[in-house]
Image (tube, rainbow, N blue to C red):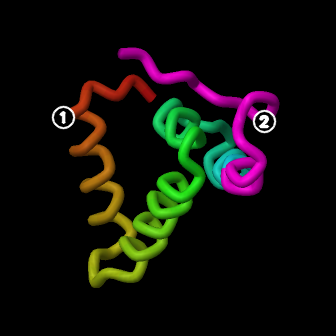
Amino acid sequence: MEFPLHSDVSAPAAALPLLKTTQQVFGMIPNLERTMAAAPALLEGYGLLWDLFDKTSFSPVERQIVYQTINVEHGCSY
């Protein structure tokens, strides 16, 4: 099953501010967020998890190592 990759044209209205924020933070909208836009509550929850992770005791460098490890494990190309 393939999931649509939403944009500011195709996403539900409730997802638009979330996608805009993602665009501002990352300079792009990753495909995962574009897919999650179909369920705005899911997209919002994902953003909240990012915010909560920033509040952990991990330093910025440690958090980046976690992010990069996840990227490698998932074969992320960006």
For the record, the magenta segment spans 1-18
- For label 2, the SS is loop
Q: Left or right: where does residue 51 sit relative to residue 73?
A: right
Is residue 53 found inside the magenta-colored segment of the image? no
Residue identifier under label 2: 8
Amino acid of disc 1: Glu
- Of residues 33 and 23, the one nearer the viewer is 33
Residue type indicated by callout 2: Asp
Q: Quadrant of the N terminus?
A: top left
Magenta segment, prevailing SS (helix, strand or loop): loop
Q: Position of residue 77 (x, y in %)?
A: 39, 23
Residue sitting at the far right: 9
* Position of the C terminus by quadrant: top left
In the picture shown, does residue 77 fall above or below 61? above
2 vs 1, front mark? 2
Look at 58% across and 35% down and name the residue there.
34
Q: Quadrant of residue 53?
A: bottom left
Q: Residue 12 in the image: x percent, y percent?
A: 71, 42
Point 44% across, 64% down: residue: 50
Using the numbered discs, state the Cα–Cα distance from disc 2 to disc 1 in whole angstroms. 29 Å
- Label 1 sits on residue: 73
Q: Earlier in the sequence, mark 2 or mark 1?
A: 2
